[in-house]
Amino acid sequence: MPRRRIGDDVIQVNYQDSRPIYQQVHDGFRRQILGGVLRPGDQLPSVRELSTRLAVNPNTVQRAYRELEQEGCVYSVRGKGSFVADASDAARAHQAELLGRFDSLVQELQALGVTPEQLRQRLEGGTT
């Protein structure tokens, strides 16, 4: 299967966001990779290309790409660029991390008096 080149509208930076720019870039790509928008083998924009497009320092983009690679979401090919990896392992790890955080929040909410019924309603789309 030929590799797809990612278009111009992949990542946007919000300068009003309290998160660092590298984190916004990282989170944007991770969300698209884990969500299946970006598929294994798709080529990410080069660091220089994306940093120019976003008007940010190349080190900012490099840091986001490095973290994505450490998580197993992307891989680099020397002289060719960065590509989306098969992120099924990364997706499972991220899911486990989120479920752990969810469990902690549920325990804290229950300690504050939130009932299991209120939690159930919240999960089903209602508010408490």
Image: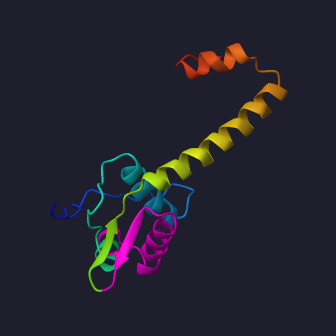
Q: Is residue 12 left or right of residue 8?
A: right
Q: Nearer the viewer, residue 85 or 50?
A: 85
In the displayed orientation, state which residue is furthest to the bottom: 79
- Asked which quadrant contains residue 106, the reply is top right
Residue at the spot 36% in from the left edge and 72% down from the top edge: 55
- Is residue 90 shown above or below 51? above
Image vertical order of residue 52 relative to residue 21, above or below:
below
Image quarter of residue 76 = bottom left
* Magenta stretch holds residue 57: yes
Figure quadrant of residue 6: bottom left
Pick the quarter of the image with the N terminus: bottom left
In this picture, residue 15 sits left or right of residue 44:
right
**What residue is at 37 percent from the left and 53 percent from the top?**
33
- The residue lying at 27 percent from left, 63 percent from top is 41
- Report the span colored magenta: 51-78
Residue at 82% from the left image edge and 21% from the top image edge: 113
Q: Which residue is outermost to the left? A: 2
Q: Main secondary structure of the magenta part?
A: helix
- Horizontally, residue 61 falls left or right of residue 105, namely left
